[in-house]
Image (spheres, rainbow, N blue to C red):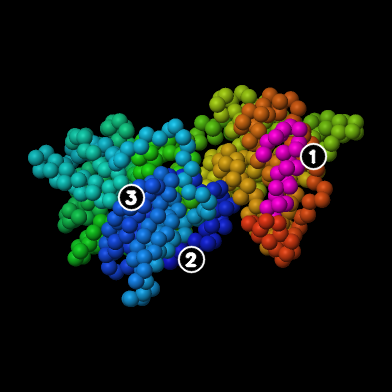
Amino acid sequence: MFVTLAMLARRACLGLAVALWAAGACSYGAVAVVSNRTSAPLVAKTTADDNLPSGLMLAPGDSRPVFGLESLTIEWSAGDESRTARLTPGCAYFFAQSAPGQPIELEQIGLNDRPGPPLVLPGGDLLAVATPTLKVRALVDDDEPRRAAAWEPALRARLAAASDVIEAHCGVRLELVGFDAWDSDNDERDFFRTLAEFEREVAPVPGGVAIGFSSQYAVERGRYHLGGTRAPLHTHILLKERAQGILNTERLELLVHELGHLLGAVHSPEATSVMRPLLVGGLQREAGARVQFDPVNTLTMSLVADEMRLRRISSISDATALTRRRLAEIYAAIDPTLPEDPAAAVYQRLVGSAAAGPIVEDARKVIAQIERVAQFKEQALANIAEQAQAGGSDEGDRLLEWYVRQAAAAALRVRKEHAEKAFLLAIGTALDDQGMLTRLPTVSGVERQLSPDAERRRRAEIVGEPTMRGRRDLAKHFFVSAHLVVILGSEGARDAGLLKEVVDSHGGSGFSFVDLMADRAGIVFAHAVLGGRISLERIAREFTVAAVLPTLEDLPEGLQAAEFSAGFGGPTDPRLQTELQKIEVRVGSLPIYGQAP
């Protein structure tokens, strides 16, 4: 059995709670993965949407995807009875048997899975294809000793076998569009510099990938790079080809391993997975050995493949934010299982920052303006003090208002299509002096681009004490929640705030409805800004705390777990939901929000 499968299954419930902090409702491509962890072949029936059931054959160790658009169910025989289960999109499952003769059970692998409705597809942008293809141009370097009449058929057969493995696990087929040769620098001894050379000199097939087989480098046993690519759906793969005593099935594993990385797979602790870190280890010399992926990597590849199937993407940055978020959650769950291997953490950062570059660049310009004006806060505070003597609000509130207006003015000078998002991202990051955002798995990649730790610490020393309603913590709650709306959506931001209060009730500062008021107000504010109902021009001209955050009277806080449970139950208790609804109405009644929900 997968050596960490039981660990991940035990973490399923904890993963649900952690993911509530990190993200909102489940809403990505309708694909789930099923694996056979019994010792015998297994036949099941799957039903996607309103289609007729189809058979699913699973040999021991097999992992297979189930694709649909709206709903996925599976039926199997468990002893004398037939059982049916609904599969949650974006999740992985395995069949197991506790003892011979016992019924076969279907269990879910805990991968930071989030509860929520099944697929919610955006309309109008689907270009579904039955079997997505990856166009491949295969190349050998000038150190290839064989004639083309020998290496072409060998590579053609290897690529065909790899295509069969990849298609079985995620539905993507390789389409070989040509062979060629390239002249590598024979004086180069660094494999990754040769990969960079290959990328510079060899143009990939449009929308596809160039795969180089380099005889300049020998296949080595042990913890060595046997091949390389840089990111999901990258344009190039380079493989070491020169070897003695390496079986064709081992060469096939090397190719499938790198194709797995190209489609979103990372290293796995499962000893029989093609994604194990130490690949050349004799597995393919055992009788009956097959090239197969573990269920978790079958899921990551299938999520990428589903984007290729539904939207014909050719870059991971083109994938929906929801798919990228789910991939990041899975990588965050895999990472602790191989603490000395960086692959999962690297891919988590890559998908977390995909498509965020231009917005991050513009948000950093807004942050830089906040830092610039912070240098003059003493003069600003003197002006604020004069206003306070004339009946103005709290000095800290005035300072925050000054920063927000300056940030909005700066956002008006960045690219128009990014202005509102850059503003919300920047002000949330600027006020997050404790680095809370960098600790959230699904947003940490973007956060570290927005503000490395050293910058955050330096900024915290100069911005002073901006507050809302006289409290600095409420300023952070408000604008961090507004920030999270940009990345996670409103449900993700709501769940994050609620979970934080639940955690605080267990020995921390206690559950606070005041904090939740600031969270919810920040979310509504973000929606109003992103929806154009509150313009950046208006914010730059007249933003005030009183306009966007209701008064805080009659809101309990500091509730420890026992007191909170006695009065409000838990997150789904109607008593708590009633109180949260009252907060929503109270926020929405502010004139600036109009009828904003």
Q: Dot 1 lies on which element?
A: helix
The answer to whether the residue labelled 2 contacts the one labelled 3, judged by CB atoms less than 8 Å apart, is no
The residue beneath circle 2 is: 10
Closest to the camera, between mark 1 and mark 3, is 3
At 63% across and 47% down in the image, what residue appears?
Answer: 494
Q: Relative to 247, is 546 on the left or the right?
A: right
Give whichever of 568, 295 is nearer the camera.
Answer: 568
Which residues are drawn in magenta? 576-597
Q: Earlier in the sequence, mark 2 or mark 3?
A: 2
- The amino acid beneath tag 3 is Leu
Q: Quadrant of residue 567?
A: bottom right
Mark 1 lies on residue: 396
The answer to whether residue 78 shows anywhere in this view is yes
- Image quarter of residue 211: top left
Asked if the magenta segment contains residue 584, the reply would be yes
Q: Earlier in the sequence, mark 1 or mark 3?
A: 3
Q: Distance between the Cα atoms at labels 2 and 1? A: 46 Å
Quadrant of residue 525 within the rendered picture: top right
Label 2 vs label 3, nearer the camera: 3
Q: CA distance from mark 1 to mark 3?
A: 63 Å
Identify the residue shown where x is 38% and y is 39%.
310
